[in-house]
Image: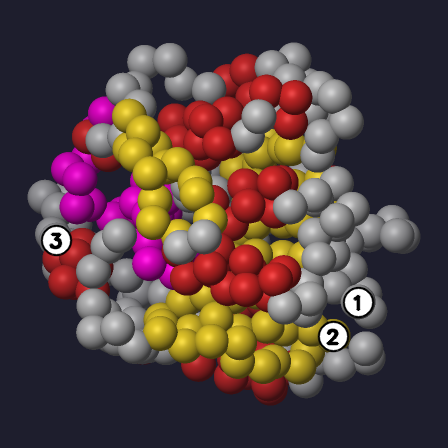
Amino acid sequence: MAADSEVINQLSIGFEREPFRMFQSSDERRLDLGLGLGFLDSVERPLLPPPPCVEVLPSKVSESVKYTVEEVDLGSVKLLKGRVRTQDVFSLSNSDLVPGKYEGGLKLWEGSIDLVKTLESEVCTGNLSFEGKRVLELGCGHGLPGIFTCIKGASAVHFQDFNQEVLRCLTIPNVHTNLPEQFQPMRSNAASSEGGPEIRFFAGDWSEVNSILPLAQGDLPAGYDVILMAETVYSITALPNLYRLIKMCLSQPDGVVYMAGKKHYFGVGGGTRRFLSIVEKDGGMASSLVTDVADGSSNVREVWKLCCKSR
């Protein structure tokens, strides 16, 4: 579980080619995303073009990267997580974070653990059920929240990450490690073998990945019943595209979003409250705080629930 000091170390690293920058200066913020929302029209220009959007089949799991397994302490929930070296996957040191190339998906961030614990509590109290639900986990990395929903009866679980390497080397192996054999996705196609959930994996940037997500194609009854995301709101540059993607993907009027993250990410400008300010200004969704965590290991972490105001 990463601490804030680790994040700060990642954001202070420089490279010989050009200095590390999470976002550009105010003089460079001139990219119009055409969202039709005036408060999102002026944002920072991405440093690198995004990788192509692709579906990653379960058969494409990496066989060349060493993958080891350890148990994660989630209270009453028992899950396993893999460990791989960033050096082996991306030829980067283990503390590197390169916008446009690698967005930290190989690390298990605190928000993912907070999210699984919150989902378990929501299920136990009757506030949430995954039975028969279609679930999308954005910025999945290890994919533990999505894996939890597989165990709890979801009918479809789609995992999305910026990097297909993260999916091949970590997410897919984690799914295979945690799920019983009859629930695992078959190597030859996306469906599970014996009546388990449809499990699929998609790589791409939030500005484009809607083009390949099956339930974000605009045909009714499109949309995911539940969208999950943990530690996705750290970069101020990514927030407009993230919010736009959520609006494209969420089933209406009953879909819900669970978002876990830090209240503020110092030094990079993002955070749960910055994202919620975008939600509030748009006016289409309501938000409610489910839980917060102030355990001294980092700044305050939160889990929020979002839903359409027409509910």
Residue 74 image offset from top left, x and y in percent: 39, 52
Q: Is residue 3 above or below residue 190?
A: below
Can residue 215 be seen here? The reply is no
Q: Earlier in the sequence, mark 3 or mark 2?
A: 3
Which picture quadrant has residue 177?
A: top left
Disc 2 marks which residue? 308
Q: Earlier in the sequence, mark 1 or mark 3?
A: 3
Under circle 1, the secondary element is loop
Residue at 39% in and 26% down: 169
Residue 277 image offset from top left, x and y in percent: 51, 84
Q: Nearer the viewer, residue 238 or 106?
A: 106
Give the amino acid type for the residue marked by disc 2 in the picture: Cys
| Disc 1 from disc 3: Cα separation | 43 Å
| Disc 2 from disc 1: Cα separation | 7 Å
Magenta segment includes 193: no
Q: Nearer the viewer, mark 1 or mark 3?
A: 1
Residue 113 image offset from top left, x and y in percent: 39, 55
Asked whether the residues under the numbered discs 2 and 1 touch, taking CB atoms below 8 Å apart as contact, a structural biologist would say yes
The numbered dot on residue 302 is: none
